Amino acid sequence: MGYKVAVAGATGAVGREMLQTLSERNFPADEVFALASEKSAGREVSYGDDGVLKITALDKFDFSNADIALFSAGGDLSKAYAPKAGEAGCLVIDNSSAFRMDPNVPLIVPEVNPDTIMQAKPQNKGKNIIANPNCSTAQLVVALKPLHDAFNIKRVVVSTYQATSGAGSQGMDELFNQTKGIFVNDTVTPEVFTKQIAFNAIPHIDVFMDDGFTKEEWKMQAETAKILDPDIKLVAHCVRIPVFIGHSEAVFVETDKPFNEKQVRDLLRKAEGVSVIDMRADEGYVTPVECAGDDMVYVSRIRKDTTVENGVVFWCVSDNLRKGAALNSVQIAELAVARKYFNAKG
């Protein structure tokens, strides 16, 4: 017996990746519904190598006909439709920021905090909603988890170098069009980003807050606290760079307990979802280009931080559309099945 799965936002970059990931991982779906706006209704989207799904309007869909709904339609639509889906008995896995800080909604990365999944059940004050974390947070906590379990992390400093796909397909289009335009001397007019993104780096993602940090930087701190440990002190600086897919992070970790470099490498090599590629030679590390289309969180450039008593530095790269969004959502759905969150509807 399989499950009925709805994907809301199926025409977007993450929604399409969700459909692809469901197919690639052979999720036990008897039926898959592709949902999008009314203007997209009737269009077709790919599912797997040969499958095609016809778009249904999100506002017309009856969520009692689905067991699981993967939402990637934006925060406003999630706020409007996710609670209705949850009340209809459908487990919602939401990729927006709408419910991440709701104390009754678990924020899950399956490799890190799988045991929180049952908090989503209505009898546990949940709403049949599970939140997917910010893409930059998701890959970070996967790498931090084994180190925290072994050595108790007390502080993290992280600088992110984030791909334009983090701003959706429009962000990738702007990078492509600006790059092409510069070569023919066209005037660059930023629309999606605050400044020219082609051949540039923009130290600003999301809105500014009163303390000078951006909301993206705040999300990393708040979400890491909720997923991993509220006692971890984290400070982030988030930068947008001219890359299509793949977020990169320079991570500085300080722990309570002492360790040696071999222990760190061994722990990360054994960690679920992590691949260590670190040969201390030209090309002996992973960049965004190499991680695109891959499910792993890659860790490179591991070395001791000699400026603090117990410190380590590493480079972390992952496909933000997959582990940062679509893959993590599908893994949560797999976790729900494995933990018998519900019984499949016939």
Image: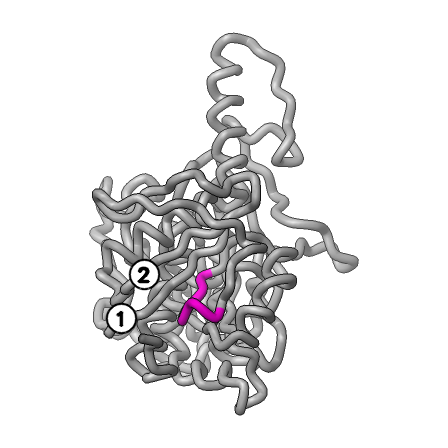
| Disc 2 target residue | 31
Q: Give 98 or 323, whichever is nearer the viewer.
A: 98
Q: Position of residue 126 (x, y in %)?
A: 55, 83
**Residue 261 lies in quadrant:** bottom left
**Residue 292 falls left or right of residue 6:** left
Q: Which residues are magenta?
A: 64-70
| Residue 96 x/y as whole percent | 55, 59
Residue drawn at (60%, 70%) of the image: 83
What amino acid type should be assigned to the residue bearing mark 1?
Gly
Image location of residue 161, percent across then percent down: 48, 46
- Residue for point 47% across, 44% down: 12
- Farthest-out residue, right: 210
Q: Amino acid at mark 2?
A: Glu
Q: Position of residue 163 (x, y in %)?
A: 46, 42
Say if 128 sits above or below 38 in the image. Answer: below
Whether 8 is among the magenta residues is: no
Residue found farthest to the bottom: 123
> Dividing the image into 4 quarters, which one contains the N terminus?
bottom left
Q: Could you say which disc has been placed on residue 118 in the image?
A: none
Assess whether mark 1 and mark 2 are in contact (beta carbons under 8 angstroms). Answer: yes
